[in-house]
């Protein structure tokens, strides 16, 4: 490889809090499928162009069996050995599986997450959101919107759906934050994973004995699934169900506050909300980096990716590709953002996307309606960005207001 191959994945948000790192943008323009040298010296690939990203995600020769998937990022986790073959599978964690194992487990859940089923839950989700906004309105500003709104809403909803006691949130929020941190060593990540897995194994064991009215109970009734698989599925849904949407709600609010004309339009015309949510998904791409493992030599974007390579996908870079979206770095709630890659593509496309959409529509709608004078309580440049975490967003969003509709 030549000297020009970048070392490690650029993460610094030097172009602005909502934009891809400038080195990622430059790489996409120069070579949308490009070699990348990991900090430990081994070679991999970085895919940033829209067409190449879609093609890759639709191609199951790019295996999802890379370590333990969402739990950590192998090339930069201290102590992580270089992957030389598809990793062993963690029971239930089907985001990191290939067919037929992935197919078998995902199929067990499709009924629970259909558009129709989610539509039926919409009222309930709106209720949870409005109750949380009642509590927010009773507080004296400034408050941290992450702690008081963006994190509780999706956590409450996913706990309710799965039948996980919300009172136990300390347990899973602390541990899930550990996996999401980039710079935590392998041992600590495994310890946090073990703790959460143990907690969920106990929970699903009691559900198998006395099932209730929730998704984990429904799965526990199915003898085809082991306790380990149930715990793994619970872990995946719990983590994916609250971390991602929480960051979209908080970072999305920050982005809207930084685009006051579009915020005003959205307030005046709530019918714009579904389109605005899609555009925020495209523009922010909070779940940006995903990994695959090349199970054989594969041609992609005019390059040959050799068998055994670790391949990094940047969904954010793909969503800002000028070959696919006009003026891609502008937030424009009027554009048709459909076709964005923020929920992935292919067989692993986000299972919870309808749920996430409903939560975001209800969340932004309620927040804008009930807090007409909402604003940042600190200068935008001081907002703490989650460049140290696997899901992007803000650590805190201090906001204030002068009048709220209780
Ligand atoms: C998969 C993003 C919300 C559950 C994915 C993938 C992406 C994604 C990009 C594909 C991963 C891959 O190809 O390796 C997001 C974003 C969300 C969100 C941005 C919020 C705004 C949710 C919610 C749930 C959920 C609320 C709750 C159930 C899942 C699951 C998978 C997944 C189970 C794995 C699907 C599979 O492997 O077949 N998500 N997600 N997600 N998501 Fe989401």
Image (cartoon, rainbow, N blue to C red):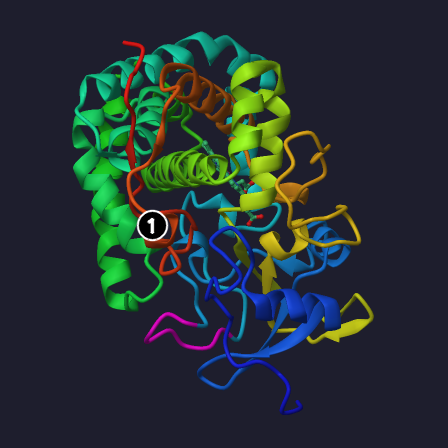
Q: In this view, does 72 lie above or below 224?
A: below
Q: Can residue 103 be seen in this view?
A: no
In the image, what residue occupies the spot 28% across and 49% down?
177
Residue in the picture at 40% in, 38% down: 233
Residue 213 position in % (x across, y down): 34, 12
Beta carbon at label 1 within 8 Å of ligand 1: no
Residue 157 falls left or right of residue 1: left
Q: Can you tell which quarter of the image residue 318 is in? A: bottom right
> Which SS class for mark 1?
loop
Name the magenta segment's main secondary structure. loop
State the residue in front, 375 or 8. Answer: 375
> Is residue 144 inside the magenta stretch?
no
Q: Mark 1 points at which residue?
A: 383
153 in relation to 24, above or below: above
Q: Give the range drawn in magenta.
A: 76-83
Q: Is residue 334 above or below residue 116?
A: below
The answer to which quarter of the image holds residue 245 is top left
């Amino acid at each position: 490889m030549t000297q020009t191959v970048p070392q490690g994945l650029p993460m610094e948000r030097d172009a602005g809090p909502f934009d891809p790192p400038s080195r990622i943008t430059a790489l996409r323009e120069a070579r949308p499928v490009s070699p990348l040298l990991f900090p430990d010296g081994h070679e991999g690939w970085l895919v940033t162009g829209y067409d190449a990203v879609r093609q890759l995600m639709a191609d199951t020769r790019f295996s999802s069996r890379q370590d333990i998937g969402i739990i950590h990022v192998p090339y930069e986790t201290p102590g992580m050995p270089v992957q030389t073959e598809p990793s062993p599978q963690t029971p239930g964690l089907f985001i990191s599986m290939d067919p037929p194992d992935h197919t078998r487990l995902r199929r067990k859940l499709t009924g629970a997450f259909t558009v129709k089923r989610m539509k039926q839950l919409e009222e309930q989700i709106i209720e949870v959101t409005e109750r949380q906004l009642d509590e927010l309105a009773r507080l004296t500003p400034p408050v941290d919107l992450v702690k008081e709104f963006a994190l509780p809403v999706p956590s409450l909803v996913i706990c309710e759906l799965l039948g996980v006691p919300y009172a136990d949130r300390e347990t899973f929020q602390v541990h899930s934050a550990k996996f999401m941190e980039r710079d935590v060593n392998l041992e600590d990540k495994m310890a946090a994973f073990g703790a959460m897995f143990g907690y969920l194994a106990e929970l699903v064991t009691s559900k198998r004995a006395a099932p209730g009215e929730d998704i984990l109970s429904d799965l526990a009734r199915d003898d085809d699934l082991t306790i380990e698989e149930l715990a793994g599925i619970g872990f995946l849904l719990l983590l994916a169900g609250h971390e991602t949407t929480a960051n979209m709600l908080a970072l999305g609010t920050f982005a809207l506050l930084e685009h006051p004309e579009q915020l005003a339009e959205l307030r005046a015309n709530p019918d714009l909300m579904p389109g605005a949510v899609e555009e925020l998904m495209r523009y922010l791409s909070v779940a940006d980096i995903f990994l695959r493992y090349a199970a054989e030599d594969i041609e992609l974007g005019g390059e040959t990716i050799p068998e055994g390579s670790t391949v990094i996908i940047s969904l954010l870079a793909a969503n800002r590709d000028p070959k696919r979206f006009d003026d891609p770095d502008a937030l424009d709630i009027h554009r048709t953002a459909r076709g964005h890659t923020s929920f992935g593509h292919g067989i692993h496309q986000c299972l919870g996307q309808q749920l996430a959409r409903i939560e975001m529509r209800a969340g932004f709608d309620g927040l804008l309606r009930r807090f007409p004078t909402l604003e940042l309580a600190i200068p935008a440049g001081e907002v703490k960005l989650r460049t140290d975490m696997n899901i992007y967003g803000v650590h805190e969003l201090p906001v204030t207001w002068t009048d709220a509709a209780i």
